[in-house]
Amino acid sequence: MSPQDFRFSNEPEPHKQRTRAILTSHPEVRELIGKNPTTFLAILFCVGSMVALAWLVRDAAWYWVLLLAYFVGAFFNHSLFVLIHECSHNLLFKKKSWNYLASILANLPHGLPSAVSFTRYHIIHHSHQGEFLWDADLPGRKEAAWFGNNPFSKALWLLLFPFFQLFRTFRLKHIRPLDGWIVTNWIVQFAFDAFIWIVFGPQAVLFLLLSFFFSVGLHPLGARWIQEHYLTLDPVQETYSYYGPLNTIAFNVGYHNEHHDLPSVPWNRLPELRKRAPEFYNTLKAHRSWTLLFFRFLFDPSITLHSRMLRADRTPGQD
């Protein structure tokens, strides 16, 4: 694999086959599948905490806003991204609409509406992993060529990561970019932003936006996006888990192989899935530190935005 090219595989994505093998060898893991409505309490706590922090910095100097966003707000907002991810798989409530509403609530401290759109593109990512015209998790070709090859450009890419995620959606022509739920997400989000601006002031809005960008970007938490599917430890293993301490406050989002294998298992049961099927997960390479991966991604020339696995695009329903 050249650092200037994506790696191409003629093999199907690895998770369906491993899922069948796990269910055959350990049928008891089906017990882990289900809903966890108490996750909604975590959403309430994180949203409430971010609103309280926004109020706290309403009259603070800009540097205090910056520091609090980087060292505190980013962690709450990252957790809210994970909780939106849980909603996208309908892992809170039986009714899909309730999960949408919960995700819109979790989206509020991010400042920009993304919860419902994320659900649309993320579910496609699971069913079309590595397919360029379907998988919005893959960087664009120009994105990879222009930003993925040196420490400065990779740092800029992490800093502006939300914008790159938005631009990627334009190449996915098969997904409707707009519907009633997405419009609802926008209306509720911008109404919340206006409320914070009017009642708390612009410093509070700045805090929320900085927390949002740090939570997915130029921050050790941003290494999560590298951890999940970049070919960092093995030239053919295209999904990696993270088993470090930040899983405690990130709702086990690091258990990424486990999640892809059984996406109907909620966050609190993913460690149990690994425990019940150790022969499938202990043999896979995994990351132990997002911070180390963050700096390795920036300064290791062998890891670029081309360090991803591609496969041929399929039509929906095609095996």
Image (spheres, rainbow, N blue to C red):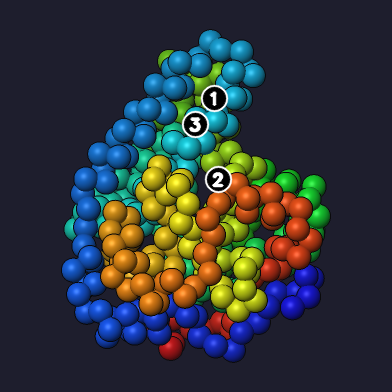
Cα distance, mark 3 to mark 2?
12 Å
The residue to which callout 1 is attached is 68
Residue 163 appearing in the image: no
> Up-down: is 41 above or below 237?
above
Residue under the image location 52 percent in, 36 percent down:
74
Towards the viewer: 18 or 278: 278
**Neighbours of disc 1 within 10 Å: few (<14), some (14-19), many (20+):** some
| Viewer-nearest of discs 3 and 2 | 2
How many callouts does the rendering have? 3
Q: Secondary structure at mark 2?
A: helix
Asked if residue 248 lies left or right of residue 78, the reply is left
Residue 54 x %, y %: 46, 22
Q: Are marks 3 and 2 in contact (CB under 8 Å)?
A: no
Q: Are marks 1 and 3 in contact (CB under 8 Å)?
A: yes
Name the amino acid type tagged 3: Gly
The residue to which callout 2 is attached is 221
Q: Quadrant of residue 108?
A: top left
Asked if residue 25 lies left or right of residue 50, the reply is left
Q: Earlier in the sequence, mark 1 or mark 3?
A: 1
Name the amino acid type tagged 2: Leu
Cα distance, mark 2 to mark 1?
15 Å
Residue 35 appearing in the image: yes
The residue to which callout 3 is attached is 73
Q: Secondary structure at mark 3?
A: helix
Cα distance, mark 1 to mark 3?
6 Å
Name the amino acid type tagged 1: Leu
Towards the viewer: 300 or 137: 300
Residue under the image location 61 percent in, 13 percent down:
61
Residue 156 x %, y %: 73, 46
Residue under the image location 40 percent in, 25 percent down:
51
| Image quadrant where one finds the C terminus | bottom left
Residue 316 x %, y %: 44, 81
